[in-house]
Amino acid sequence: MRLLAIVEEQPARVVLVMGNHDVAGQVRERATFSTVLTEPANLKIGKYQFRVGHSQAEIMKAPQAINLFGHDLTVRSGLREGKLYLNGLEGIHLICPDTGLFRRLRYPIGTDDSRLVKRRYRP
């Protein structure tokens, strides 16, 4: 929830797309300005039409100029047929809705281990 507090301080529209392991209800309760999505959706933000969804299969039903998904790494981020596809498992994507430029941030330490339910062994 610390990340949500930081995001909520920013003077920009923020859309958080929750996955099946995220606690969407808790995020939604605490989000004041951010939009929290749990279902596939098309969004117009700035100059661009976005398609957001949990899996790549959901995205491919109606791909848009910028497509955000996650769930597995069999499909990597990239440009295909003039459309941008960004896999959220590769990192947190910050996208400028006026230029379409994006920056990928690494997840906080421990996030990937937590996703795989890895635990540190302590004798």
Image: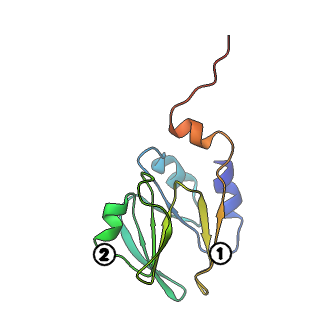
Looking at this view, name the residue that lies furthest to the bottom. 47
Q: Position of residue 95 (x, y in %)?
A: 60, 74
Residue 92 position by quadrant: bottom right
Q: Position of residue 67 (x, y in %)?
A: 44, 72
Q: Amino acid at mark 2?
A: Ala
Mark 1 or 2: the one toward you: 2
Q: Position of residue 104 (x, y in %)?
A: 64, 64
Q: Position of residue 31 (x, y in %)?
A: 57, 58
Q: Amino acid at mark 1?
A: Ala
Under circle 1, the secondary element is: loop
Which residue does the image show at 42% across and 60% down from the upper left? Answer: 75
Q: How is the image coloured?
A: rainbow
Which residue does the image show at 60% across and 42% down from the upper left? Answer: 111
Looking at this view, name the residue that lies furthest to the top. 123
Instruction: Answer with left or right where residue 62 lies relative to residue 79.
Output: left
Return the mark for residue 12.
1
Under circle 2, the secondary element is: loop
Which residue does the image show at 52% across and 89% down from the upper left? Answer: 47
Mark 1–mark 2 Cα distance, whole angstroms, equals 26 Å
Q: Name the residue tied to disc 2.
A: 62
